[in-house]
Image: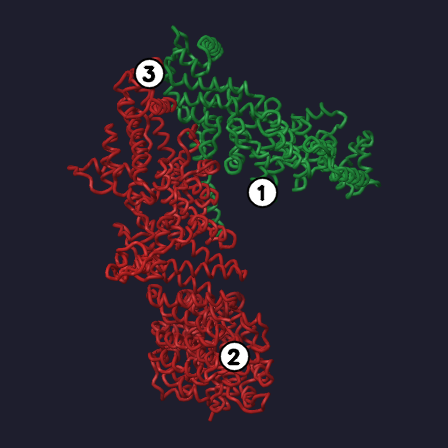
Chain colours: A red, B green
Amino acid sequence: MASKFWAADGSSDSESDASSGSSSGYSSDGQRGNNDNRLAYVFSDSDSSDDEGRVVKSGKERALESFQTHGKNLRKHMKDSDYWEIQQEFDLLMKTMIKAKQYLAEGVPRPLVKILVDLEDYVTEKLKDKAAFKKLSARQGRALNRMKLTLKKHNKAYEVVIQAYRQNPMVSDDEEADDDSSKSSGSSSSSSSSSSSSSSSSSSDSSAKKGSDKDSDSDSDDESDDSDVDWDADSSSSSSSDDEAEGGLSQLKGRALWLKKTVSTKKKENKVKSDKPKASQDLKKAARLAAEALTATKSVIPAEGLTPSILDRKVKELAAQRGRRGKDNRQLLRELEALSRLSLKFGPRVEVPILMYVISAQFGLQRTMEDFMDTLTWKACAGYLQRIADVVDEGYTLSNEAVDESDLFLSSGGHTKMKAAANAADGAMAAVAADEKLVNPHTGESETQDERAERLRLEKEKAMTAEEKKVIPVVGSLALHLSRLEEEYTKSLQRTSHHSQEYIARLRDESKLVELLARFQSYFEQQNMPSEAAALAQLRVEHLYYRHDSIAREVDKAALFNERFGDVAMLHPSCHVVEEAFTGPHDFSKIHPGAVQGKPSIQSESETDFAGLISDLCKYVYKHGTDQAKMRAVICHVYHHAIHDRFLDARDLLLMSHLQDKIHDCGDTSTMIMFNRMMVNIGMCAFRLGRIYDAHQCLADICSVRVRELLAQGVTMGRFNEKSAEQEKAEKRRQVPYHQHINLDLLEACHLISAMLLEVPNMAGEASNRRGRVISRTFRKYHDQYNHQVFTGPPEQTRDFVMCAAKHLMKGEWQTCAELVSNLDVWQLVPGEDAAKKIGKMLTEKVKLEGLRTYLFAFSTQYDSMSLAQLCAMFEMTKNEVHSVVSKMMINRELYASWDQPTETIVLQRVEPTALQVMALQFAEKAGVLMETNERLLDAQTGGHGFKDDHWKNGDGDDRWQGRGGNQRGHQRGGRGGRGGGNQRGRGGGGFQRGKDRNQGRRTGGGRGGGRGGDKNRDRRN
Amino acid sequence: MTAHSTESTAEQWDLTAQVSPYLDRHLIFPLLEYIIENLDYSKDDVAAARLELLRPTHMVDYAAECHKALHGDAPAEMKQQKEQVYQQLETLKNGCEPLLKLCQDENGKKKLVESGKWNVAGLTQLPETTSEMIQTYLALARFHFDCGDYKSSRDMLTHYISWHASPPATSAEDEEEDLVLAGVQQSKHQQQAQNNPDLGNPSMYYLKKVDKDMLQVLWGKLACEILVEDWTAARTALDAVKTAMETLTQMNQISALEALQQRTWLLHWSLFVYWNGPGGLEQLVDLCMTEKYKQAITTNAPHLLRYLTAAVLLCKRRVTSKTVEARRLMKQLVYVLQDCEYTDPIVEFVNCLCVKYDFDAAQVKLQECEKVLRADFFLCQQTAVFMEEARIFVFENYCRIHHKIDLQALGDKLAMAPAEAERWMVDLIRNATDMDACLQDDCVVMNSSRQSIYEQVMERTKDLNVRSATLSQSLNTLWNEARKEKLKREKAVMED
């Protein structure tokens, strides 16, 4: 009927469209064509375009259709420059879009995006032309203006898609060209699929089309036999176009982005390395295999006469169906897996590409960010990747490049025309003509499409050198697959309850994952792809850095054990009893047969040097990684140093990398969390080593507020802030898996004890006329709380213990204090031999020392002189120690006293000021306070200084994700900075600031507050 | 050259191995000489090391001599090498013959200087000289240096530098360089005028611009000056290198890492300069306490802390008239020390005294120090002074926290006989201004230096003045800004 007309129309369209596409403007000639395209495009079943009325349409179809009409009208009006009409039409379109929201959520059809983009461009262009604009009638002008506003608002929702479209408009144009011909194929009934194949070959991005390319024999039996039986009954051309639509859709889903790549990164032809002649037993085997494999599904493919090409075509067909409506992803995956099993016999050249499809199909099972891959699938996926790694180890390389299409076709004379037809867009007719000659140029016999494909493949293979044969072209990127795998692993850990056995079992997979990453890392290194290798190295580091060596060894051993012998619970109980294998004759009356082999054990071959490994990996990342990866690598490196008590290394690395300055701008919450974890660990490391001051500096910031949130170890419900569901979800996503958690009790103990050791003498000193300076607000807060309790029971929590200890320390009862803090349960959690004991010892020493200081501060006023021996006895310290402590206090003017050397006593000097002097002192003090108040006032006005820094008290939103590398104190002193002698007051503000940092901190302290404010704003914006 | 670890502390604390990687080959020779004489190393080993060092240089005669001493006779290849060296020298000399002549011809030079042609452009205009010749000239200078003829090398470099410089009288100097160098340059100006009146060219460091090559030249110059042992000139050269380096870093011509490396080098070279010649110590302390150089010490060369510590101890009383400043200096030093994990008797000594207040341990360390000092190439000359200063330092600290000290104990602390200690004490009390002490029946009694209330009040209100000034100033700016803003707004309104 109208077939001729359609065909002709289509061909002319494709031409004009191609030109319009290339000139990137929009051409009015193509207008009608465009609309028709859309028609053909949307109704995958092209026949229905002829008789719309009769077909029962789904809601989606209806929506799409109405988009079409609106789009069509819009284009018409755009051509006429009738703004008012455009506006009316656009309003209608908007309404429809709102109605069709549910379908749009799945994805925005590309044509719709195109019209939106065009419209936007059109409007801006028109608005630019001021002169023309002035000439417009009032109504038109107003309409144009309003269009601009509404468009802007409206398009915001589709920003992502539009962006993607703008970046890659050509694809869509290609598509449209495609659609034209596919439409024509639909209507020119006899040669439909062949023409479609010819034209689709011109586009270079749809693998699905490649599939259709090869099965373009329209009356090929297997198409009707098997593929159409239980799969979607659409013709291949429609599947291709629909797949493209899916490509568009998928851009909406964050994760699906990856998938899109896998689909559209195309490969041309899969070549089997060596084509074995199909011996009959092979066939039987294949048949059996297939039968076994496909019990779940219906026969995907006939096992007889199976060639790599057929397999290949099938795979592509399947891949093309991915994400289609009504297509179950699981089903698809099963089918693909079956195919992969079939492909085993054709060697890695066939197998690997199919495996890649399988893997991406596996990842395709997760629809949303919340979904995670179940363990079985994950393991299977890891298994496939392992298999690929094996193949790769055999010396194969995977290439992601597309073979130039023209080469393929030029190699066989019969296809040159097809290519010409497609490329020059001569129209479907020419293509049809080309297709008629489907004969073997060698034998002159006619052949089916499959046969031809196979023949071509063989020819091509013959032409390849051995080296080329080692290169397997695949779809998708291995590095991406691996990082996806890693992500899924983390996600599954996040979702699994950490109390369950399942979680523990899952942990074993980590070593598998790490090994996999290592294998591919070395592969990429060999392939000279350092950026991919660095990415994998970084992932590896992230799975290694948090483990203490002792734990790491055990865990790896356990994983190995599990791999070799299975679950411990599943072993025969008798074999646990014995230690070694029996060597002598087996007397089974005495020995249980299960115990003959002895207790299964893993010989630890060589102790892995984890520190070296980490540092090697990190260095690799520093060299080749992205900035983000580098930063993370540094963090991991420092962290690893810190948990192994290499404090100075950790500190130097931290300072040299300027991490503390950079972390605020990194913009990535998970990196900031890592940073926080790292800081906390450095703090604990310093604590273990007895560097109380450093420890407190590192811990104070993070431990003072919302520790859980800052370390991403569980969600706290704040009283004041109501998080939106979105925020909550995001927070859940960035939770650190349980086994990587830092024990919060231990952390609190470290923090509070170090605060106690610093603050208690400070508080005692405050009492004796010196102006106080708060070292730890947190400690003071808890201290006040503890004091205000009406009844104080025996301590239960760690915090209570510390508070109780502090109380005793203040009274000078250092023994009780030392006992309380050094016998805390949490010290058992510190890895390393005798760690708890060591910490206890260190704490006792520190408590003694601070006890002495506190005592002197608090009670020295009551004495005229004190004897050294007495002090030594009181605090069980040697004379030297006491002498050193007291001397230091004297020098620092904390204690107004001096030694009387012959008698070894401390002579305290105290002058009671007269009333006038007291008043003078008070006056001076008041003047100072006044000054300070004035300064604060002015600071508040200018906002230059850090006094408003207290914003964290009213806890707002998300802005505490900044690493807060310890500048709170830096602020205070920054604010007051510049006053004489500021440098006498202890060192630096932040964590540790050596050399350069120290001064800089002071200098820039003033400006910091402002900077922080800025941070806050930025965070809000985010 | 590597230290064979022996029991003797002198060798154990020998720093030659750590220092030498940062020195020029030629600078190491004096160190080795010193080691041979003063330390208990196997002489042959040191000689072998020296020979190894000599090999790449052109000092064939010296090498042959060493070889002879070590192995009995000089090998033939050395003779061959000697011939080659002479040949090369000849070619180089021929390559820049006219320039050499020109440099020797005082009159011609003077003329050129007066006509403003004493620079690269001017020279290339001359008929007999070309720009290649100037490069050859530089190569020759380098060659002379390699041959050990430091003096001629220095003179040649001086000429070379002067061609690239523009004297202050004729052209506007590079401003930033001028700013940094201003003080130094003026004194330099005079010195040079006195030293080499015949040259009449005090502006040799008035370089218009520096690049990496010029930096090399300056390094060469510094090496020459050090080896010629002209310490004043060396100090100028050192400053020139330092300035050039900072300029280059500012212009981003050398990376941060490179700059760090170069700074470390400079610190090491400066040891030669500052430990010799008067007044060097203060400058050494200043240099080391500069933020960037401190960084270089802590990251690259913690062993330099020994020299820094010694320098601080030695000059602290001289530099600082006030005790407060001396204490601040000490405090700074302690911070630096705490940042590094370097130990050494001298550092330990300070640590004991200023951090642990363990006077007995300090005493032990002080004795060790003496040994170390004697064995150290740079410090050996200052040993006596150091010991004296250290004693005073100990005593000062001791007095600060003591009310009454037994002379006997004091003698022990200072490693002196009681009578000697008493004499020493009396001298000290007499000379000291800020010590209020007296001797009472075998005891030293300090009068308390407790801050009086008056002082306390003064202390507390001391900074109010400054702070109010700052306050009013910032208030002023704030007000001005507000006014400007207002004006702007008004203007905007008017325009509308």
Name which residue type carries label 3: Glu
Relative to residue B195, is residue A364 depicted above or below? below
* Tag 1 secondary structure: helix
**Structural distance between the alpha carbons of marks 2 and 3:** 99 Å
Work out whether B161 lies above or below B312.
below
Q: Residues within 10 Å of mark 3 (few under 14, many from 20)?
A: some
Mark toward the viewer: 2 or 3 = 2
Q: Residues within 10 Å of mark 1 (few under 14, many from 20)?
A: few
Residue in front for this viewpoint, B342 or A938: B342
Task: Report the residue marked by disc 2.
Answer: A275
What mark, if any, has residue B258 been given in the picture?
A: 1
Q: Nearer the viewer, residue B209 or A848?
A: A848
Identity, as a three-letter code, of the amino acid under mark 2: Asp
Spot occupied by residue A761 in the image (x, y as percentages of width and height): 30, 29
Q: In what element is the residue under mark 2?
A: loop
Instruction: State the residue position of label 3.
Output: A904
Labelled pair 3, 1 in contact (Cβ < 8 Å) = no
Asked if one can make out residue A151 in the rendered structure from this viewpoint, the answer is no
Percent of width and height locating residue B224: 68, 32
- Residue A286, quarter of the rendered image: bottom left
**Which chain is mark 1 on?**
B
Residue at the image position 58 percent from the left and 78 percent from the top: A462
Q: Amino acid at mark 1?
A: Glu
The answer to whether one can see residue A577 in this image is yes
